[in-house]
Image: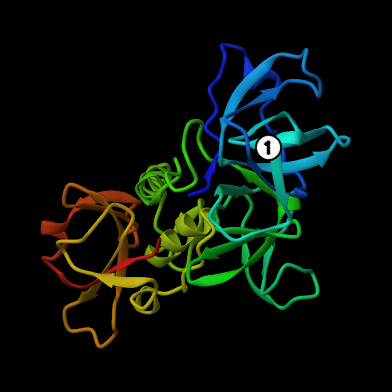
Amino acid sequence: MHKFVRPVLLGIALSAVMTVGAAAAYEGVGTVTCDVLNLRAEPNTESEVLAHAMEEDVVLIMETVNDQWYKVDYCTIQGYVSADHLTVETTYDQPLAYGRVDIQSGTLNIRADATTDSAKVGSLQNRALLPLNAFKDGWFKTEMNGVVGYVSGDYVTVVNGEGKRADEPVLDAASLERQIVDYAKQFLGTPYIYGGSTPSGFDCSGFTSYVYRHFGYSLTRTSASQLSNGRGVSLEELRPGDLICFRSYGSSKAATHVGIYVGDNQYIHSPRTGDVVKISDLSTATSDKAIVGYRRII
């Protein structure tokens, strides 16, 4: 099993000088062929060793310095490794890590294939987190909200955590769930505004769609339509970050309200005119409306 580089830091202030500050283009994927490969601060054997890569660890090639050295990127750290001990491929079909969209404006297109001439199949907001499932000619293959395609490596920064392999990413589903809940809580106290979908005021589905859009997921706009987003789960399977959809008694709509489960039998939502974004107990929420579905988006 190939795996992303496991850095062994040697007591230096990496964050001050070696952390990636913006997305960078990638030339290929390198697999380590020796027992231990040093990652160095400069492309020479006299420079400081930043980390060790073990045999079959994987690095992303940022630049071919010369026939002896590559500049590489892994776990948000940049450094140099000897070209003698890497097998480099421009196409790599195994999971690599997780990444973050870094784009100055607009959105990042997801394409059907690894070229700008390919059809657009989706888009991602800046700072969205995404799995990097494969690499092809400078593009990463990803899957987001059921959409499978490629994004340009020019606008993606690897954010896999230090010491984690690609099949053990720091940004796993449970971590992302916690981030979604924490982000939603930032808007506690925001007033309810009918039709609102910004931090100046939310209605219920405007709130849930705004929170999920921050993480690169596009929800449909109404509570009734969000009942069909993602996939259904049972009460026993409910996890933080899942949507909870309600229907007011007597209503003919599929759903009339929606919120985000935060754990401990509570959910965060934007209830009604005159109220604010708040956390409520599910037991009290069902006094005037019935729960009609739980939806998992991530």
Q: Is residue 216 above or below residue 71?
A: below
Q: Is residue 103 visible?
A: no
Q: Is residue 42 left or right of residue 20?
A: right
Q: Is residue 13 visible?
A: yes
Q: Position of residue 90 (x, y in %)?
A: 74, 56
Q: Position of residue 283 (x, y in %)?
A: 10, 58
Residue farthest along the right direction in this orientation? 66
Q: Quadrant of residue 12?
A: top right
Classify mark 1: residues with Cα within 10 Å, few (<14), some (14-19) or many (20+).
many
Q: Quadrant of residue 251?
A: bottom left
Label 1 SS? strand
> Which residue is identified by label 1?
73
At x 89%, y 35%, the residue is 66
Q: Nearer the viewer, residue 162 or 151?
A: 162
At x 78%, y 49%, the residue is 27
At x 77%, y 17%, the residue is 45
